[in-house]
Amino acid sequence: CEAPFPEAGQSVVKRESESESGTPQRQQENENKMLVYEDKLSGDELCSDSYPSEVTTDGCFLEVQGSWIVKGEVEIDTGANPSAEGGDDDIGGGSNEQKVVDIIDAFELVEQGEYGKKDLMSYFKGWLASIMEHIEEDQKDDFKVRVQTGIKRLVGLRKELQVFTGPSMDPDATMVFAYYKEGASAPTFIYFKDAMREVKC
């Protein structure tokens, strides 16, 4: 069966540990299962449980910590440099090396332009009508309460937010938001927990 999302306030951080058989826990988990989170509207894969995460904002959001990685160290004789939103200029000695954010790169997130308050509210109005059709009937009342709390928080963060679509680039599907926590060197990604479907891989 599919494992549930973590409860509100609970952090999920993958750590290397030993299982009863002596097999490293991370290796065992990778061999047995991984949860990929898909947008219920577009079907885009937006994240997985391979990254440190926690449920926040009264259960509305799954916040996932991204990291900068260097991509392409072992690539040789390739064509153009790989591109990913949020990456810096090529770094290191090889022309194939590029610094990217792991989540953006792995799930091919596409950064959108700046969203002001009116833009966000217009988007959320249409998105709410669409996603409501994918919420279980007995959960709709609770969802309406927590999603308004989440939307209010995002609107308050609008000047700090990066906004992304999935690889389908559907502007009406569920957006992914990112911001930098105080003192952080890499972005934290915000996902609407109720808008994602868990798929075991």
Image (spheres, grey):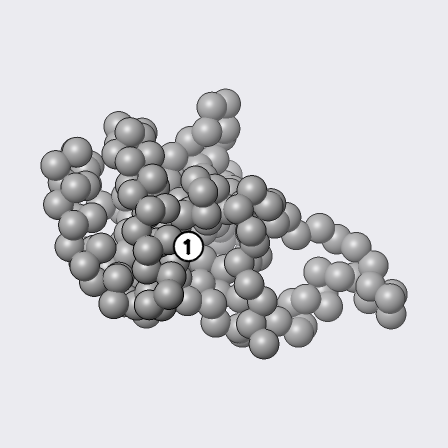
Q: Residue furthest bottom?
A: 1
Where residue 96 appears, as percent x and y from the top left, is 44, 50
- The quarter in which the N terminus is drawn is bottom right
Q: Give me the residue at 41% from left, 67% from top.
A: 197
- Please say whether residue 52 is visible from this viewpoint: no
- Please say whether residue 121 is visible from this viewpoint: yes
Where residue 92 appears, as percent x and y from the top left, is 50, 39
Q: Give me the residue at 46% from left, 47% from top.
A: 59
191 or 105: which is nearer to us? 191
Above or below residue 67? Residue 105 is below
40 or 14: which is nearer to us? 40
How many labels, in total? 1
Where residue 29 appears, as percent x and y from the top left, is 68, 66
Which element carries disc 1, helix, strand or loop? helix
Q: Amino acid at mark 1?
A: Lys
- Name the image quarter holding residue 114: top left
Where residue 184 appears, as percent x and y from the top left, is 50, 28
Q: Residue furthest top?
A: 183
148 or 93: which is nearer to us? 148
Q: Residues within 10 Å of mark 1 (few under 14, many from 20)?
A: some
Above or below residue 113? Residue 47 is below
- Name the image quarter holding residue 167: bottom left
Q: Give me the residue at 33% from left, 34% from top.
A: 153
- Name the image quarter holding residue 131: bottom left
Report which residue position mark 1 lands on: 193
- The quarter in which the C terminus is drawn is bottom right
